[in-house]
Image (cartoon, grey):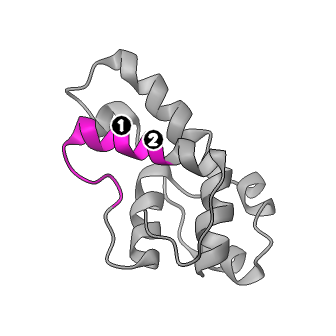
Amino acid sequence: MHMKYNFSSSAVDIWSVGCILAEMLANRPLFPGKHYLDQLNHILNILGSPTPDDLTCIINEKARSYLQALPFKPTIPWPRLFPKADAKGMPWIDTLLGTSINALYIGFICSSV
């Protein structure tokens, strides 16, 4: 994942492992992007719009306003993205990518927008 600024934490590392696992299942990048806003749109197209709780963690007002102005996007279920994958792996993807969403918003969006 491209980040405009250098930011790292264990939550971001967990997110990265989730991306790698998902890319192994899909045999292609999960969140490709030409630049950070394009990549952010790919992420939101799969994970859906951030919740109000997700937005409270974003201290960068410009980033928070940008996200609030976007149209609502529903979450795409993992089995629809990976129909041939063993269902036993879906909780892993959800844990690695779904529960690390605050790390993504803090690390990616706050430093990029």
Q: Is residue 7 visible?
A: yes
Pointer 2 with pointer 1, Cβ within 8 A: yes
Q: Residue at coordinates 44% horizontally, 33% vertically from top-left? A: 93
Left or right of 27 on screen, residue 87 = right
Q: Is residue 68 visible?
A: no
Report how far apart the C-alphas of labels 2 and 1 lie in the structure: 6 Å
Position of the C terminus by quadrant: bottom right
In which image quadrant can residue 99 be found? top right
Badge 1 density bin: few <14, some 14–19, many ≥20, Cα 10 Å:
some
Left or right of 98 on screen, residue 27 = left
Q: Residue at coordinates 19% horizontally, 43% vertically from top-left? A: 27
**Amino acid type of disc 2?**
Val
Residue 112 in picture, x, y percent from top left: 58, 78
Residue 76 in picture, x, y percent from top left: 41, 44
Residue 69, compared with residue 51, is above or below; it is below
In which image quadrant can residue 26 be found? top left
Q: Secondary structure at mark 2?
A: helix
Q: Residue at coordinates 51% horizontally, 42% vertically from top-left? A: 97
State how many labels appear.
Answer: 2
Residue 41 in picture, x, y percent from top left: 43, 68
Q: Secondary structure at mark 1?
A: helix
Magenta span of residues: 16-31
**Amino acid type of disc 1?**
Leu
The outermost residue toward the top is 88
Residue 3, compared with residue 25, is above or below; it is below
Badge 2 density bin: few <14, some 14–19, many ≥20, Cα 10 Å:
some
Where is mark 1, residue-wise? 21
Q: Which mark is residue 17?
A: 2
